[in-house]
Image: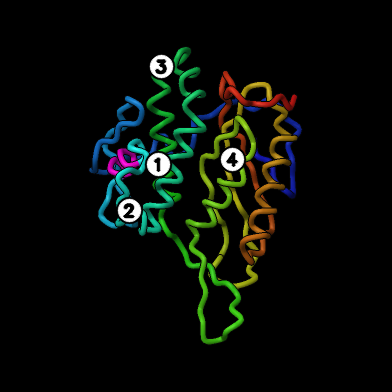
Amino acid sequence: MAMSDNHSSDDSTPTPTPAEGTDAAQGPGDHLIVDGVLVEQIEEPDDLDGFTLDDLADYLDSGRIPVNPAIESSPGCQMALSALDRLQHVTWSMLEAEAKESPERDNIWIAGLLDNIRQEIRSGRDIPLTSPDPTVRMMLSEGSVRGLVRAACDQVDGVLIGRCVLTGDVTIPGEPIDVDVTASVGWGENLHQLARELRSLIRTALARHTELNVKAVNVTIQDIHTRRTRNSKDRS
């Protein structure tokens, strides 16, 4: 179910579809275990300064103690840690409930989420920012903008963001772009209201922290959990 600034569907009960990225081919790489679930052949991003997602997951599990200066000073590692931390805190109650009814889906879902994390922490394109000093060139990475979108959507209980794509030439100042987001939500949510809330949060965050000319924010409800998170609020 796709909902955007320019069009909203009248359907309020979409047919759930697998999360984007769950069928993506996996290249050779490390094996990653998240809370006892094995996700095989994780292809590592290029921006982790020699570390792997497995290294970062272990570091996060240790409470980031002792402090590893190389990890803490790496922008790519910091983005990956934020994404992994979000994965741990937002999804486990959902995964546990889903696993009781569909155990085979547990591993597939985590694999899809990790694929999205790998995409998110890549720097991507450079987005220019206005500088008061003409001799200074200021840039914002596309990966950091995707992180802003996810952080904004994390304010809504029971929502898990899948893919976030900036469509358009973000390297040209003022060029209109679309923000395309997929989401997984709890069963029984008011999908139109939820999509409007997510679009508003995304627009506010991007207007506050970037100079992007956002033409449309498109929210696609791509999956529905059969249970909600413990703190989920009723919007129906």
Q: Write down the quadrant of residue 205 in the picture.
A: bottom right
Q: Is residue 103 above or below residue 132?
A: above
Residue found 58% across the figure and 72% down from its top: 129
Residue 71 numbered tag: 2
Q: What residue is shown with label 3?
A: 103
How much space separates mark 3 and mark 2, taking CA atoms? 34 Å
Circle 4 sits in a helix, a strand or a loop, which is it? loop
Locate residue 149 relative to residue 123 in the image: left or right. Answer: right
Identify which amino acid the numbered label 2 is placed on: Ile
How much space separates mark 2 and mark 1, taking CA atoms? 21 Å
Q: Is residue 206 above or below residue 98?
A: below
Identify which amino acid the numbered label 4 is placed on: Asp
Instruction: Give percent across and percent down for residue 109.
Output: 43, 29
Question: Could you tell which of marks 4 and 1 lies nearer the N-terminus?
Answer: 1
How much space separates mark 4 and mark 2, taking CA atoms? 24 Å
Question: Could you tell which of marks 3 and 1 lies nearer the N-terminus?
Answer: 3
Image quadrant for the N terminus?
Answer: top right
Q: Is residue 56 magenta?
A: yes
Circle 1 sits in a helix, a strand or a loop, which is it? helix
State the residue lying farthest toward the front: 66
Q: What residue is shown with label 4?
A: 154
Locate residue 2 relative to residue 108 in the image: left or right. Answer: right
Q: Are marks 3 and 2 in contact (CB under 8 Å)?
A: no
Question: Could you tell which of marks 4 and 2 lies nearer the N-terminus?
Answer: 2
Q: Is residue 11 above or below residue 164?
A: above
Identify which amino acid the numbered label 3 is placed on: Pro
